[in-house]
Image (tube, rainbow, N blue to C red):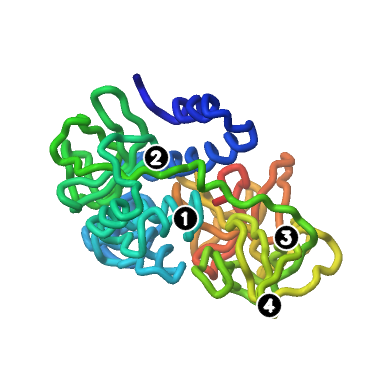
Amino acid sequence: MYHDFNEELRSLILRGASKHERNDIMSKLQEFLNLGDYYASNGGYLEKKSNAYLDDFKKNAGYNNYTRFARDVNSLGQPGCQGQPWCAEYQFWKLVKSLGITKALQIMGGGFYNCVSITNHAKTNGTWHSKPKVGALVIFRNGSHVGSVQSFDSSKIYTNEGNTSSAAGVVANGGAVRNKSYLISDSSIDGYVWIDWDETVQETWKKKGTRVATVNDLYVRETPNGYVMGSINKGTVVETDGKTNGKWTHVKADGIGIGWIWTGYLAKEVGSTSATITGKQDKTQVLFKGNVTATVLNVRTWAGTEYPNIKKYPKLNQGNEVEVMNFTKKDKEGDKWYYIRIAGKYYGFVYAEYIQKM
């Protein structure tokens, strides 16, 4: 039998999970699988020779182990190990994006950047198995490499791996994200770290109010003074559920999830009850971060193809990360354009359809 996302959904139905529970569980698993397919697409994300063009799939490609994944993990207050082999931190990064940092650490352990440590952590916690499962981690060659299982059948597993290559077999420092396959009987497979996606559903959220951030780069943490999940900027509106813990407020931040923010940096919202786009240009308010989905995307001085490209950063490539600001315009055809910030300092307009919210 072929085991994939749909097979996992069928198993949930047989176990009697409610529709709401199934949707929550499967949306997180699907996000994890989709992230893998996305970064393996179009030849795969390539590691960089320096700390430049980290968000671009192809630019500045080299073999010095610089990646966007290490940068992002570092920004969470974790050892991203920039410039070091990155197969494990890539899997950790996907889990953080899908489940949050607390769950990712529970699955991989504090030594997530080391495959031997991941193996030992799984064996201690009872998640180490000899058989594959969709969404599981797979460890190779005595802890020298790690991937994740996208699907499997009676004879093969189909994996998503970072820091590998398209060559057959285990390539532990190949410099790219790739989807690969192996015989289940392959002797290079040590075993699997199963992830119980049933237990990863986030807590039920009941909105009771909103607050607005009063400073830029305000951390949202998993627990009071705990791991950093992400950050928001001044003017960003978050939901609250009325819970506090000392000087911390329980919040739900768009694009980040449920966490805690230092109460002193939150204020009551004046006017609207959500971070809606207004007609006033506001370069200090970031609505969300997004990725470019087009192969090449022009950045223009105003909304419309008749306007010239900006000089400092005229084009973006697929996979580039941008900040979408609190301002949109429609062109003469009625199509929406986002006003964006690139690399923290360059501003311009892009066709909104080609920006996917992260």
Q: Is residue 44 visible?
A: no
Q: Residues within 10 Å of mark 1 (few under 14, many from 20)?
A: some
Amino acid carrying label 2: it is Gly
Task: Say which mark, if any, is on residue 239.
Answer: 3
Q: Earlier in the sequence, mark 3 or mark 1?
A: 1
Amino acid carrying label 3: it is Glu
Q: Is residue 311 visible?
A: yes
Residue drawn at (60%, 73%), measured in percent from left and top?
A: 218
Q: CA distance from mark 4 to mark 2?
A: 38 Å
Q: Residues within 10 Å of mark 4 (few under 14, many from 20)?
A: some
Q: Residues within 10 Å of mark 3 (few under 14, many from 20)?
A: many
What residue is disc 1 on? Answer: 103
x, y percent for residue 216: 62, 74
In the picture as drawn, the residue positioned furthest to the right comes out as 271
Q: Is residue 155 left or right of residue 40?
A: left
Q: Nearer the viewer, mark 3 or mark 1?
A: 1
Front position in the image: 287 or 240? 240
Q: Is residue 229 left or right of residue 19?
A: left
Task: Say which mark, if any, is on residue 135.
Answer: 2
Amino acid carrying label 4: it is Tyr
Residue drawn at (74%, 59%), measured in percent from left and top?
A: 275
Amino acid carrying label 1: it is Lys
